[in-house]
Amino acid sequence: MQNQSESQFLVTMSTAKPVREKVAAHRQRLREAGRIYVNTDLPADLVDCLDKIKAERGLASRAQVFELALKAFVENEMRA
């Protein structure tokens, strides 16, 4: 059992660099498209609401819900 655990750890460690490279490449493509990666933490109840809206609207990610909500907020603030 211990060998299996060590083996899984080695596999995870060996794939860490390619994953980091893929993430870096993805974020570079986002920047080239005029987008900026933003990371934040939110209360669990708010994330639950985002997930509900995501499912109801058939959106692919929380990011899409967050972007729509933020656009609506900014538009509302600009009118005020």
Image: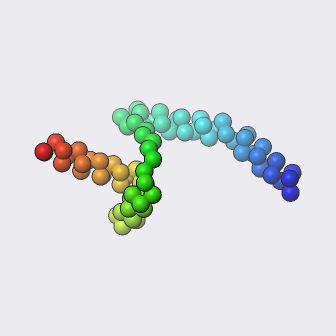
55 or 29: nearer the eye? 55
> Residue 64: x, y in percent?
37, 52
In the image, is 18 to the left or to the right of 64? right
Q: Quadrant of residue 59?
A: bottom left
In the image, is 50 to the left or to the right of 3? left
Q: Quadrant of residue 65?
A: bottom left
In the image, is 71 to the left or to the right of 42? left
Identified at 30% across, 52% down, the residue is: 68
63 or 41: nearer the eye? 41
Identified at 76% across, 46% down, the residue is: 9
Q: Is residue 52 above or below residue 3?
A: below
> Residue 10: x, y in percent?
78, 43
39 or 57: nearer the eye? 39
Q: Is residue 36 above or below residue 42?
A: above
Quadrant location, the N terminus? bottom right
Q: Is residue 56 above or below residue 16?
A: below
Query: Could you tell me if residue 54 is visible in this image?
Result: no
> Residue 4: x, y in percent?
83, 53
In the image as oriented, which residue stretches furthest toward the left? Answer: 80
Identified at 16% across, 42% down, the residue is: 78
Identified at 59% across, 35% down, the residue is: 21
Q: Which colour assignment does the render follow?
A: rainbow
> Residue 6: x, y in percent?
82, 47
